[in-house]
Image: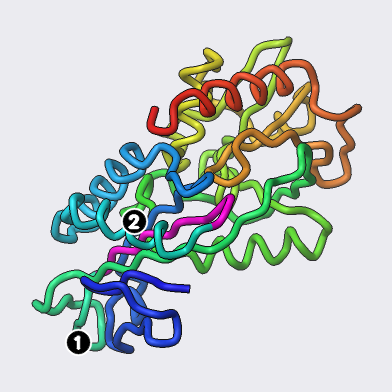
């Protein structure tokens, strides 16, 4: 396994960053996860645009996107695999201990790991913690992920693959690493970005390709929705068959199945939509 670390490709055993990197000490960094299929990244342009937006929102210097593309290409070429998880991490770089940033410049790490295809359906739970739709990091894909780690661990304890959050207003928001869609009266809805959810790349493509409506939804809509599905880079579109103790009937419902089919077809025809 070879990775890109701060300007060069290195073997995994030599791929190291300083213990004083601000991304490690205080979570001062942003990242993207990109699906690769047979050595080609999916929706890379959209992911790099969001990487730049997240960096700007965090006050980091603008990433050199040409360098990031070159790093991605070299890492993918160096690690051939049929389906992969490409991780791009951009940090505050070497800094003093504490919240102040240093002046050494940002750090860039690109790595690739194998990724299996997700099952068509999954179970989720709800958690009592909330997303802050007015927080300083709202809408940014940062490396400050400990809250998600805790929630996802609880999901796994309950036989689920994802945990869903409300926001502080009691509205449906998102999962730890996914966006959520619900079917009401045969119509497809997803929370708006104003709810505090991440503007997911797969979410945006699903909205564009299916005509889903962005709608403020109460958290308890999960108890009444006819169908529910998740979207994320590695899930694509994945049906939900259980929320907490509620079993949804059958496999992917008709609206979800159609969304899955549309996404697979459109994504297969254009790897950088």
Q: Does the magenta stretch include residue 1?
A: no
In screen coordinates, is 118 left or right of 5?
A: right
Judging depth in this view, the residue of 116 and 11 nearest the camera is: 11
The residue identified by callout 1 is 96
Q: Position of residue 13 (x, y in %)?
A: 44, 86
Counting labels gives: 2
The residue identified by callout 2 is 72
The quadrant of the image that shows the C terminus is: top left
**Which residue lies at the image location 35% right of the left edge and 50% below the top edge?**
140
Examine the rendered structure and indicate whether residue 128 appears above or below residue 182.
below
- The residue segment tinted magenta is 81-91
Judging depth in this view, the residue of 62 and 3 nearest the camera is: 3
Which element is circle 1 on?
loop
**Which residue lies at the image location 18% right of the left edge and 61% below the top edge?**
60
**Which residue lies at the image location 50% right of the left edge and 50% below the top edge?**
131
How far, Cα to Cα, is label 1 from label 2? 29 Å
Examine the rendered structure and indicate whether residue 213 appears above or below residue 80.
above
Q: Where is residue 268 in the image (x, y as percent from the top left)?
A: 54, 28
Examine the rendered structure and indicate whether residue 37 appears above or below residue 208.
below
Q: Alpha-carbon neighbours of circle 2 within 10 Å: few (<14), some, or many (≥20)?
A: many
Q: Position of residue 212 (x, y in %)?
A: 55, 17
In screen coordinates, is 258 left or right of 273?
A: right
In screen coordinates, is 174 left or right of 103?
A: right
Q: Where is residue 72 in the image (x, y as percent from the top left)?
A: 34, 56
Mark positioned earlier in the residue sequence (1 or 2): 2
Q: Alpha-carbon neighbours of circle 1 within 10 Å: few (<14), some, or many (≥20)?
A: some
**Which residue lies at the image location 37% right of the left edge and 59% below the top edge?**
88
């Amino acid at each position: 396994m070879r990775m890109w670390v701060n300007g060069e490709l290195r073997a995994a055993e030599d791929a190291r960053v300083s213990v004083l990197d601000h991304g490690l000490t205080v979570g001062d960094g942003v990242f993207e996860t990109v699906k690769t299929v047979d050595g080609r990244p999916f929706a890379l342009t959209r992911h790099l645009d969001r990487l730049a937006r997240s960096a700007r929102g965090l006050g980091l210097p603008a990433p050199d996107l040409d360098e990031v593309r070159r790093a991605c290409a070299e890492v993918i070429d160096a690690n051939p695999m049929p389906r992969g998880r490409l991780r791009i991490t951009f940090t505050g770089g070497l800094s003093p201990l504490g919240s102040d940033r240093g002046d050494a410049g940002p750090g860039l790490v690109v790595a690739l790991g194998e990724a299996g295809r997700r099952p068509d359906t999954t179970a989720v739970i709800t958690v009592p913690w909330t997303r802050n739709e007015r927080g300083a990091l709202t809408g940014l894909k940062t490396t400050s992920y400990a809250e998600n780690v805790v929630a996802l661990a609880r999901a796994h304890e309950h036989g689920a693959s994802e945990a869903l959050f409300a926001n502080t207003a009691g509205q449906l928001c998102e999962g730890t690493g996914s966006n959520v869609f619900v079917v009401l009266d045969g119509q497809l809805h997803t929370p708006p970005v104003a709810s505090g959810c991440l503007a997911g790349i797969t979410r945006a493509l699903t909205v564009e390709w299916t005509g889903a409506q962005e709608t403020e939804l109460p958290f308890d809509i999960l108890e009444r929705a006819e169908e529910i599905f998740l979207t994320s880079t590695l899930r694509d579109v994945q049906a939900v068959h259980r929320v907490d103790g509620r079993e949804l009937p059958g496999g992917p419902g008709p609206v979800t199945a159609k969304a899955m089919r549309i996404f697979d077809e459109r994504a297969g025809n254009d790897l950088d939509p």
